[in-house]
Image (spheres, helix red, strand yellow):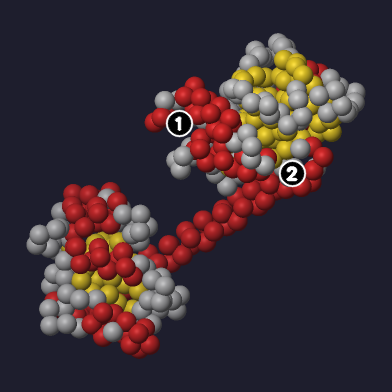
Amino acid sequence: MSATGAVCACDARGREEYLENRGACSADGRNAAAFPCVLVVDDEHLNRYTLEKMLTGEGFGVLLAANGPEGRALAQRHRPDLILLDIMMPGESGLETLTKLKADHQTASTPVILLSALTDVETKVRGLDLGAVDYVTKPFEFREVLARIRNSLKLVAAYETVIAAQAERLNQVRDAQQAILIRPEDMPQAGFAVSYQPVLEAGGDFYDVIPAGDGHGYFVADISGHDLKASFATAGLKALVRQNSGPLYTPAETLVAINRVLGHVLPSGVFLTACYLTLNARRNRITYFSCGHPPGVLVPASGGEPRLLETPGDILGVFESVTLLPLSMAVEPGDRVYLYTDGLVEDPARGGLFEGMERLGTACGQARGLPLPQAVEHVRQVVCDGRAMCDDAVLLAVEA
C-alpha cells in the first residue's frame, strides 16, 4: 500500500503480482468468481488498512481509495463486485460519489454499502434512495461488515441468475421468431430481399412471402406495441396468413379473413397495420392493398422518380368488417417495390413520419442500380442514419 493509502492495492504492488498473490480481479477487468473484489472508499487511513487486512484474510480481493474521485476511477477501471463507501469525506461526499456511480453505465449496477458515523435516519434513507443496497454504522464490527457484504453479493448473484434465465427465454423467443421468417435463399424464385430489425430480443413486426398463382404474395405487418405480447403474436399471424391464402383466396379475401380472426383474439386496444403486394410474374402486374399501413415505394427500373403506392384501407383486428381498395398496375421487368414498417421511417428528432418517408423515397431511387440485397442495406443505412431504433423495423424489397 502507498504511503497515503490512496492508491489501489492492485496498482501499488503491480497488477500481475496482485493477481497472482491475491486473485482480486480478472485480467479483463471483471473479478474471478473465486475471489470477489471489494473497493473500499474511505478518507481514513486506519479504516482502509483495517478493512483491507480483514477482507483479504477472508479471501476477498481489495481495492483502496481515499476519496470519491479516486474510487470512481478505480470502479470504472477494475469493475469491483461491491463498493464500501464512506459517507463523510472532505470534498466530494459519499452521497455525491454514490450519485455519480449510479449515473455511470459502467458502475451503475455495482452494489454499494455505505459506511456512516451518522446516526440520523434521514441520511441513511437518502443513501438507500440513491441506490445503496445497505449501510453499516461506524465504529463498525467486522463480522457485521462481512455478513452484509456476503448477503449483498449473494443477492446480486441470485438476481444475475434470474436475469440470465430471462435472457435465455427471450433468446428462445427470438430464435423461434426468426425461424418462422422466410429468407430470400429459401425462395430464390420470389425475387426479394429483406432487412428485419426488432428493437427488443424479439419483435412485433412481421413479414411473409407466399406462393400465389403465377407469382408470389408479399405480406408486411406491424402489430401495435413492441413488447413481448406483440412478439408472441407473430407466430400465430404466420399461421393465419398461410391458412387464408393460396389458390382458393383472393388477396382481399385473405385480409378480410385475417381481420375476422384477429378481432376475436387480439386484446383490446391492440391492432394490426399491414400491406399485401401480389406480383403476377407472367402478366407483369402488381396488386397492392394497404390496411392503415405506410405506402409502399415503386422504383421504375427505366428511371424516373419513385412513386408512393397510396390506397386507403382499414386497420385489422378492430372493426367487424373492413374497407379495402386495391391498387393494380402493370410493371416492367426490373421494377422494384419497397415495403416497410413505420419503425424504419419514424424519427421525431428528424421531422417525423412524412420526412422519414421522403428520405426513404430518395434512398430507394439512389439504390436503383444496386443488386437487391445491397439496395436494401443501402436504403436501411440512409434512412436510419446511425440512429438508435425505438421501434421494430422491416424493409422488404421485391423485384419484378
Q: Earlier in the sequence, mark 2 or mark 1?
A: 2
| Residue 149, quarter of the rendered image | bottom left
Q: Is residue 5 left or right of residue 391?
A: left
Instruction: Pick the residue in front: 329 or 168.
Output: 329
Residue drawn at point x = 13 percent, y = 61 percent: 88
**Residue type at tag 2:** Pro
x then y, percent, for residue 99: 24, 52
Name the residue that disc number 1 marks: 347
Q: Residue furthest right?
A: 248
In three-dimensional space, the C-alpha distance between marks 2 and 1, rounded to whole angstroms, equals 28 Å
Residue 154 occupies quadrant: bottom left
The residue under the point 47% across, 24% down is 355
Tell me, for residue 184, which label it has, or none.
Answer: 2
Which quadrant is home to the C terminus? Answer: top right
* Residue depicted at 9% across the width and 62% down the height: 90
Looking at the rendering, which quadrant does residue 242 occupy?
A: top right
Q: Is residue 66 left or right of residue 206?
A: left
Which secondary structure lies at badge 2?
A: helix
Is 303 above or below relative to 142?
Answer: above
Residue that extends furthest to the front in the rendered view of this protein: 302
Mark 2: few/some/many CA within 10 Å (<14, 14-19, 20+): some
Visible in this render: residue 371? yes
Looking at this view, is 335 or 350 the one in front? 335
What residue is rendered at 40% in x and 77% in y? 27
In the foreground, 350 or 201: 350
Would you place residue 281 above or below residue 123 in this image?
above
Label 1 sits on what residue type? Asp
Q: Is residue 317 left or right of residue 163?
A: right
